[in-house]
Amino acid sequence: MKKLLVALLFFVSCFVFYSPPAGAASKQLIIINKTTNQLAYYENNKLTKIFLVATGKKPSYTPEGKFKIVNKIVNRPYYKENIRGGDPRNPLGNRWLGINARNTPGNTYAIHGNNNASSIGKYVSAGCVRMYNEDVKWLYSKVKVGTPVIITSSSKSFKTIAAANGFKVTGAETMPVGIVDTVLKKGSQGPQVVALQKKLTSLGYSTKGTDGIFGSNTEKAVKKFQKDNNLTADGVVGPQTRKALNLK
Protein backbone atom coordinates (compact mmCIF):
# COMPACT_ATOMS: atom_id res chain seq x y z
CA MET A 1 0.00 0.00 0.00
CA LYS A 2 2.85 2.36 0.94
CA LYS A 3 4.66 1.63 -2.34
CA LEU A 4 1.48 2.33 -4.29
CA LEU A 5 1.04 5.69 -2.55
CA VAL A 6 4.65 6.72 -3.31
CA ALA A 7 4.24 5.75 -6.95
CA LEU A 8 1.00 7.74 -7.18
CA LEU A 9 2.60 10.84 -5.65
CA PHE A 10 5.51 10.59 -8.09
CA PHE A 11 3.11 10.28 -11.03
CA VAL A 12 1.13 13.36 -9.97
CA SER A 13 4.29 15.42 -9.36
CA CYS A 14 5.38 14.83 -12.96
CA PHE A 15 2.35 16.80 -14.12
CA VAL A 16 2.22 19.43 -11.37
CA PHE A 17 5.84 20.51 -11.54
CA TYR A 18 6.59 19.93 -15.21
CA SER A 19 7.03 22.99 -17.41
CA PRO A 20 7.95 22.88 -21.10
CA PRO A 21 11.51 23.88 -21.97
CA ALA A 22 12.29 27.37 -23.22
CA GLY A 23 11.67 27.64 -26.93
CA ALA A 24 9.16 24.78 -26.93
CA ALA A 25 7.09 24.58 -30.09
CA SER A 26 3.90 26.61 -30.26
CA LYS A 27 0.89 25.41 -32.23
CA GLN A 28 0.29 28.89 -33.64
CA LEU A 29 2.75 31.59 -34.56
CA ILE A 30 2.62 34.93 -36.36
CA ILE A 31 5.72 36.54 -37.88
CA ILE A 32 5.60 40.06 -39.31
CA ASN A 33 8.55 41.19 -41.42
CA LYS A 34 8.52 44.95 -41.87
CA THR A 35 11.18 44.76 -44.58
CA THR A 36 8.76 43.00 -46.93
CA ASN A 37 5.54 44.08 -45.18
CA GLN A 38 4.41 40.49 -45.04
CA LEU A 39 2.77 38.47 -42.27
CA ALA A 40 3.28 34.71 -42.02
CA TYR A 41 0.79 32.57 -40.13
CA TYR A 42 1.78 29.15 -38.79
CA GLU A 43 -0.75 26.53 -37.73
CA ASN A 44 0.60 23.44 -35.95
CA ASN A 45 4.07 24.86 -36.64
CA LYS A 46 3.52 24.71 -40.41
CA LEU A 47 3.43 27.79 -42.65
CA THR A 48 -0.20 28.14 -43.70
CA LYS A 49 -0.65 31.61 -45.20
CA ILE A 50 1.35 34.71 -46.07
CA PHE A 51 -0.42 38.07 -46.11
CA LEU A 52 0.50 41.52 -47.35
CA VAL A 53 0.28 44.15 -44.59
CA ALA A 54 0.93 47.83 -43.90
CA THR A 55 3.19 49.00 -41.07
CA GLY A 56 4.41 52.26 -39.50
CA LYS A 57 5.18 55.44 -41.40
CA LYS A 58 8.56 55.44 -39.67
CA PRO A 59 10.57 52.32 -38.68
CA SER A 60 10.20 53.17 -35.00
CA TYR A 61 6.41 53.39 -35.13
CA THR A 62 5.71 49.65 -35.35
CA PRO A 63 7.49 48.01 -32.39
CA GLU A 64 9.78 45.05 -32.92
CA GLY A 65 10.21 42.08 -30.60
CA LYS A 66 8.35 39.02 -29.27
CA PHE A 67 4.77 39.68 -28.20
CA LYS A 68 1.45 37.88 -27.77
CA ILE A 69 -2.13 38.30 -28.91
CA VAL A 70 -3.85 39.47 -25.73
CA ASN A 71 -7.35 40.34 -26.94
CA LYS A 72 -9.71 39.90 -29.90
CA ILE A 73 -12.41 42.43 -30.78
CA VAL A 74 -15.01 42.46 -33.55
CA ASN A 75 -15.76 45.93 -34.94
CA ARG A 76 -13.72 47.89 -32.40
CA PRO A 77 -14.79 51.57 -32.16
CA TYR A 78 -12.28 54.24 -33.17
CA TYR A 79 -12.38 56.18 -29.93
CA LYS A 80 -10.07 58.97 -31.07
CA GLU A 81 -12.69 60.32 -33.47
CA ASN A 82 -15.76 58.72 -31.86
CA ILE A 83 -16.47 56.42 -34.83
CA ARG A 84 -18.50 53.36 -33.96
CA GLY A 85 -17.42 49.85 -34.79
CA GLY A 86 -18.69 48.62 -38.15
CA ASP A 87 -18.87 52.14 -39.59
CA PRO A 88 -17.31 52.21 -43.11
CA ARG A 89 -15.32 55.27 -41.97
CA ASN A 90 -13.69 53.33 -39.15
CA PRO A 91 -9.96 53.05 -39.95
CA LEU A 92 -9.65 49.93 -37.76
CA GLY A 93 -11.71 47.76 -40.08
CA ASN A 94 -13.77 44.81 -38.89
CA ARG A 95 -11.35 42.88 -36.67
CA TRP A 96 -8.80 43.79 -33.97
CA LEU A 97 -6.09 41.45 -32.65
CA GLY A 98 -4.46 43.36 -29.80
CA ILE A 99 -0.81 42.71 -28.92
CA ASN A 100 1.05 43.55 -25.72
CA ALA A 101 3.82 45.58 -27.40
CA ARG A 102 5.70 48.16 -25.33
CA ASN A 103 3.96 47.01 -22.15
CA THR A 104 0.49 47.93 -23.41
CA PRO A 105 -2.56 45.74 -22.68
CA GLY A 106 -3.64 45.30 -26.29
CA ASN A 107 -5.43 48.64 -26.63
CA THR A 108 -2.66 50.53 -28.48
CA TYR A 109 -0.95 48.15 -30.89
CA ALA A 110 -2.75 45.54 -32.94
CA ILE A 111 -3.12 43.63 -36.15
CA HIS A 112 -6.35 45.00 -37.59
CA GLY A 113 -8.37 45.72 -40.72
CA ASN A 114 -8.71 49.10 -42.39
CA ASN A 115 -10.98 51.34 -44.42
CA ASN A 116 -8.36 52.07 -47.09
CA ALA A 117 -7.41 48.93 -49.02
CA SER A 118 -4.92 50.86 -51.16
CA SER A 119 -2.74 51.40 -48.06
CA ILE A 120 -1.88 47.72 -47.72
CA GLY A 121 1.73 46.94 -48.53
CA LYS A 122 2.87 50.45 -47.63
CA TYR A 123 4.43 52.22 -44.64
CA VAL A 124 1.52 54.35 -43.52
CA SER A 125 0.29 53.47 -40.03
CA ALA A 126 0.86 55.10 -36.66
CA GLY A 127 2.25 51.79 -35.38
CA CYS A 128 -0.35 49.08 -35.89
CA VAL A 129 -0.20 46.37 -38.54
CA ARG A 130 -2.97 46.78 -41.11
CA MET A 131 -4.46 44.00 -43.22
CA TYR A 132 -7.15 43.73 -45.87
CA ASN A 133 -10.48 43.32 -44.07
CA GLU A 134 -11.12 39.92 -45.63
CA ASP A 135 -7.62 38.76 -44.67
CA VAL A 136 -7.81 39.84 -41.03
CA LYS A 137 -11.29 38.35 -40.74
CA TRP A 138 -9.87 34.99 -41.78
CA LEU A 139 -6.88 35.33 -39.46
CA TYR A 140 -9.14 36.36 -36.57
CA SER A 141 -11.16 33.16 -37.00
CA LYS A 142 -8.02 31.06 -36.57
CA VAL A 143 -5.84 32.84 -34.01
CA LYS A 144 -6.24 32.27 -30.28
CA VAL A 145 -5.44 34.65 -27.45
CA GLY A 146 -1.90 33.89 -26.33
CA THR A 147 -0.55 33.26 -29.84
CA PRO A 148 3.08 34.45 -30.10
CA VAL A 149 3.77 37.35 -32.46
CA ILE A 150 7.26 38.18 -33.73
CA ILE A 151 7.76 41.56 -35.39
CA THR A 152 11.08 42.28 -37.05
CA SER A 153 12.88 43.89 -39.97
CA SER A 154 14.93 41.24 -41.70
CA SER A 155 16.29 39.97 -44.99
CA LYS A 156 16.06 36.42 -43.63
CA SER A 157 13.37 33.84 -44.41
CA PHE A 158 10.41 33.36 -42.10
CA LYS A 159 11.79 29.96 -41.09
CA THR A 160 15.13 31.49 -40.11
CA ILE A 161 13.39 34.26 -38.16
CA ALA A 162 11.31 31.66 -36.31
CA ALA A 163 14.39 29.58 -35.45
CA ALA A 164 16.24 32.65 -34.15
CA ASN A 165 13.35 33.18 -31.74
CA GLY A 166 13.18 29.60 -30.49
CA PHE A 167 10.47 28.19 -32.77
CA LYS A 168 10.90 25.16 -34.99
CA VAL A 169 8.59 25.46 -37.99
CA THR A 170 8.06 23.74 -41.32
CA GLY A 171 6.46 24.48 -44.66
CA ALA A 172 7.41 26.07 -47.95
CA GLU A 173 8.84 29.56 -47.72
CA THR A 174 7.13 30.76 -50.88
CA MET A 175 3.40 30.73 -51.56
CA PRO A 176 0.79 33.08 -53.03
CA VAL A 177 0.19 36.15 -50.85
CA GLY A 178 -3.42 36.31 -49.75
CA ILE A 179 -6.16 34.09 -48.43
CA VAL A 180 -9.48 32.80 -49.65
CA ASP A 181 -9.53 32.21 -53.39
CA THR A 182 -12.86 34.03 -53.67
CA VAL A 183 -11.26 37.32 -52.60
CA LEU A 184 -9.37 39.09 -55.36
CA LYS A 185 -7.30 42.21 -54.83
CA LYS A 186 -4.19 44.03 -55.95
CA GLY A 187 -1.42 41.45 -56.18
CA SER A 188 -3.72 38.51 -56.96
CA GLN A 189 -2.86 36.45 -60.03
CA GLY A 190 -4.29 33.59 -62.01
CA PRO A 191 -7.35 32.38 -63.94
CA GLN A 192 -9.81 34.04 -61.56
CA VAL A 193 -8.22 37.43 -62.24
CA VAL A 194 -8.49 36.78 -65.99
CA ALA A 195 -12.21 36.04 -65.54
CA LEU A 196 -12.59 39.23 -63.50
CA GLN A 197 -10.80 41.33 -66.12
CA LYS A 198 -12.92 39.90 -68.94
CA LYS A 199 -16.12 40.52 -66.99
CA LEU A 200 -15.22 44.12 -66.17
CA THR A 201 -14.17 44.80 -69.76
CA SER A 202 -17.44 43.37 -71.09
CA LEU A 203 -19.32 45.76 -68.79
CA GLY A 204 -17.39 48.77 -70.03
CA TYR A 205 -14.79 48.99 -67.25
CA SER A 206 -11.47 48.65 -69.04
CA THR A 207 -8.65 46.85 -67.24
CA LYS A 208 -6.30 47.57 -70.17
CA GLY A 209 -5.75 43.90 -70.84
CA THR A 210 -6.58 40.44 -69.49
CA ASP A 211 -3.17 39.28 -68.33
CA GLY A 212 -4.33 37.62 -65.12
CA ILE A 213 -2.44 40.10 -62.93
CA PHE A 214 -4.49 42.28 -60.58
CA GLY A 215 -2.59 45.55 -60.95
CA SER A 216 -3.41 49.26 -60.77
CA ASN A 217 -5.57 49.29 -63.91
CA THR A 218 -7.71 46.40 -62.69
CA GLU A 219 -8.01 48.03 -59.27
CA LYS A 220 -9.20 51.29 -60.86
CA ALA A 221 -11.78 49.42 -62.92
CA VAL A 222 -13.05 47.56 -59.85
CA LYS A 223 -13.34 50.81 -57.85
CA LYS A 224 -15.30 52.48 -60.65
CA PHE A 225 -17.64 49.51 -60.90
CA GLN A 226 -18.12 49.50 -57.13
CA LYS A 227 -18.85 53.22 -57.05
CA ASP A 228 -21.38 52.92 -59.87
CA ASN A 229 -23.12 50.10 -58.02
CA ASN A 230 -23.23 51.72 -54.57
CA LEU A 231 -20.64 49.36 -53.12
CA THR A 232 -17.67 50.24 -50.91
CA ALA A 233 -15.12 51.42 -53.47
CA ASP A 234 -12.06 49.74 -51.94
CA GLY A 235 -10.85 47.92 -55.05
CA VAL A 236 -11.19 44.53 -53.34
CA VAL A 237 -13.41 41.92 -54.98
CA GLY A 238 -15.09 40.27 -52.03
CA PRO A 239 -18.45 38.47 -51.78
CA GLN A 240 -20.62 41.55 -52.42
CA THR A 241 -18.67 42.74 -55.43
CA ARG A 242 -18.55 39.20 -56.81
CA LYS A 243 -22.33 38.97 -56.51
CA ALA A 244 -22.83 42.31 -58.25
CA LEU A 245 -20.53 41.20 -61.08
CA ASN A 246 -22.20 37.78 -61.22
CA LEU A 247 -18.67 36.41 -61.07
CA LYS A 248 -18.44 32.71 -60.24
Image (spheres, rainbow, N blue to C red):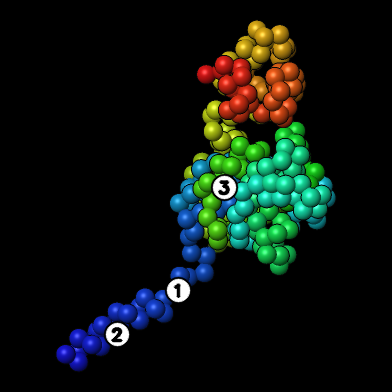
How packed is label 1: few (under 14 Cα within 10 Å), some, or many (20 or more)?
few
Q: CA distance from mark 3 to mark 2?
A: 42 Å
Give the image location of residue 54, x and y in percent: 73, 43
- Figure quadrant of the N terminus: bottom left
* Residue drawn at 71 percent across, 67 percent down: 103
- Asked which secondary structure carries label 1, the reply is loop
Local crowd size for mark 3, using a 10 Å CA cut-off: few (<14), some (14–19), many (≥20): many
As displayed, is residue 230 above or below residue 38? above
Badge 1 vs badge 2, beta-carbon distance below 8 Å: no
Q: Which residue is mark 3?
A: 140
Q: Residue furthest bottom?
A: 2
Q: Is residue 93 above or below residue 201?
A: below
Q: Nearer the viewer, mark 1 or mark 2?
A: 2
Mark sitting on residue 19: 1
Q: Amino acid at mark 1?
A: Ser
Report the amino acid beneath label 3: Tyr
For label 2, count other residues whose C-alpha is less than 10 Å away and answer few (under 14), some (14-19) or many (20+): few
Task: Say above or below: 172 vs 9.
Answer: above
Q: Is residue 234 visible?
A: yes
* Quadrant in the rendering for residue 121: top right
Pick whichever, 244 or 102, lies toward us.
244
Residue in the image at 80% along x and 56% along y = 60
Q: Which residue is mark 2?
A: 9
- Helix, strand or loop for disc 2: helix
Mark 3 or 2 closer to N-term? Answer: 2
